Amino acid sequence: MKSIFRLINIPNSEFRIPKFFIIFLFPLSVFSFLSCGSSSPVVIWTDRPEIVSYVEFFNVTQSKAKAVVVYKDKLAVSLPPAKDEQSPDIVIGSFLRNSRVKKNFAAVDRVFNRSQINPSSIYAPLLEYGKVNGRQYLIPVSFNLPTMIFSQKNHALVNGNMLIDSDSIRDSACKFNQKSKEDLFVKMGYAPSWDANFIYQLSKTFGAEFGEKGTAFSWNADSLASTIEYLKSWTLEKNESTSAEQDFSFKYLYAPKQKLVDSDRCLFAYIKSDDFFDIPGEQTESISFRWLSKDEKIFVNDDITSLGLYRKTKNAKDAYAFIEWFFLESTQKNLLERAMRMDLDTQTFGICSGFSSIKSVNERVFPAYYKTLLGKMPSEDFLIAPLALPSRWESLKERVIIPYLSEVTNTDSQNTVKSIDERITVWRNQFN
C-alpha cells in the first residue's frame, strides 16, 4: 500500500489539488486497475488537476489500459525523474516546449498514422508548436487567449465583433473618459498601468519575440522599445500620467473585473480567457468581450498545455491507448458533459482550463456550455503560438519582465530603470 501512495506524490504546501480530485484519484485511478488484475498502469505526470478526473473516466470506460496520476506543481523542471522516483509514461502540462524536448520526450508522429486522430483536426499553429525538426514531440491539449471585457451597455463604443487591437482600445477608452468639476477623473476607459500582464501581452503583439536562450531568454529589443514608447504616449496623451491612472485605480477599481466594467467606472478590463469563463454565468450575462489582437492575429497565452510521451516510457502501448482516447472529439465531449452534469465546485473552464486544441470541440461542443462563444471562436489562421520558452518562464516573467515593463512605462518615474539583463543577473543569483 505504501508504494501506491508514493506514486501519487502529494508534495508540500504548494499542493493545490482540490479534495474532489484526491477522492477520485485514490479509489478509482489506483485501486481499479489493481482489482481487475491489469498490467502496470500508465503513469501520468501533470500540473493540471483536471487530469485526475479525466483519468478516472478513462479507467472506468476502458477495459484494458489503466492510468494513475502523479501531480507535479513544478512539472517543467521535474524532468528527468530522480533516481529513486517512479518514471512517467506520459507528461501533461505547461512550458514543456524548450531545448530539452528531444531529451525528455519521444516523437509521437505515429499516433496520427495508427489512430482515428487526424492532425488536421488540431489547430495548425499549436501543432507546429510541438514540433522539433519536423517531428511531433508534443501534442497541444489546450490553450487560452488574451481577452478584453466590457459591458454590453457600452457596445456602441467598441468596434468589431471578435477582435480588438490596442489602437481601438486606446481610442474607445479615451471617449469614455470623464472628469469632475475639480478636474479629476471620475471615469477612465482603460489605462495600461492597471495591469502589467496587459502590457506584457501587448509587447508580444508588437513583436517582442520572447524566447528561450540558455537558462534565460532572448527578445527583440527594438520591438520592445516601440511597445514602451507606444504605452507611454497612450498614458500621457489620453490619461495625463501614470500617477493619474494609479490614483483612479486606487479610488475606484477594487471590485472583480466583470463588476468593474459593469459599474460604468471604466470601459475595459484585461483578463485571460480561462479566468473569464470561470466566472459564474449569472455574473457575466451583461458582459461582452473581444480577443486582444494586432493585424488580425491573436498571440496565444504562453501557458499552452501539451502532452508528451516520456522518452524512457516502459508502457508505450497503453500510453498510446490513452493518447488516442483523449484526443477524440467524442471523448472530450463526454468529459465536458460529465463535468457540467456533476456541477462540481472544483469545475474549471473547458479542457484543462482552456480551449481544446481540437477545432471541432471548440466549434461544436463549447458553445453548448459557453453560449457567448457562439460565433466568437477564431479560426487557426488568427492564432500565433509562443516561441519555445525556458522551463522556469513563469519565474522569469514574474520577477524580471513584469517589473521591468511596469517601471519603464511609468511616465512619472525619475529613477534609472534597471535593464532586463541586470534583472536576469539578479534572478540567477537569487532563484537559480
Image: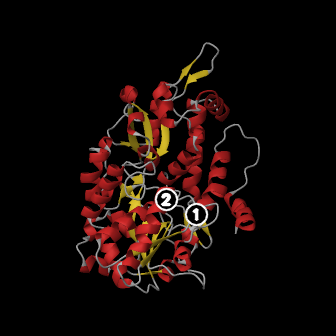
Distance between the alpha carbons at the discs numbered 1 and 2: 9 Å
Mark 1 residue crowding within 10 angstroms, few (<14) / some (14–19) / many (20+): many
Query: Which sits earlier in the primary sequence, circle 1 or circle 2?
Result: 2
Residue closer to the observer: 124 or 74: 74
- Residue 234 place in picture, x, y as percent: 55, 36
Q: Is the residue under label 2 in contact with that under label 1 (CB below 8 Å)?
A: yes
> Is residue 14 among what the camera can see?
yes
Q: Is residue 321 above or below residue 371?
A: below
- The reply, left or right, for residue 195 in relation to residue 420 is left
Q: Residue at x 40, y 35 (%)?
A: 284
Q: Secondary structure at mark 2?
A: loop
Quadrant (top left, top right, bottom left, bottom right) of the C terminus: bottom right
Three-letter amino acid code at the position of disc 2: Asp
- The reply, left or right, for residue 248 in relation to residue 290 is right
Q: Is residue 370 above or below residue 399?
A: above
Q: Residue at x 66, y 56 (%)?
A: 399
Three-letter amino acid code at the position of disc 1: Trp
Residue closer to the observer: 417 or 278: 278
Q: What sort of colour scheme is used for the picture?
A: secondary structure
Find residue 212 and report its image quarter: bottom right
Q: Secondary structure at mark 1?
A: helix
Residue that mark 2 sits on: 302
> Is residue 49 among what the camera can see?
no
- Residue 336 place in picture, x, y as percent: 32, 55
- The reply, left or right, for residue 244 in relation to residue 284 is right
Outermost top residue = 181
Find residue 415 and report its image quarter: top right
Residue that mark 1 sits on: 393
- Residue 132 place in picture, x, y as percent: 42, 77
- Residue 202 place in picture, x, y as percent: 51, 48
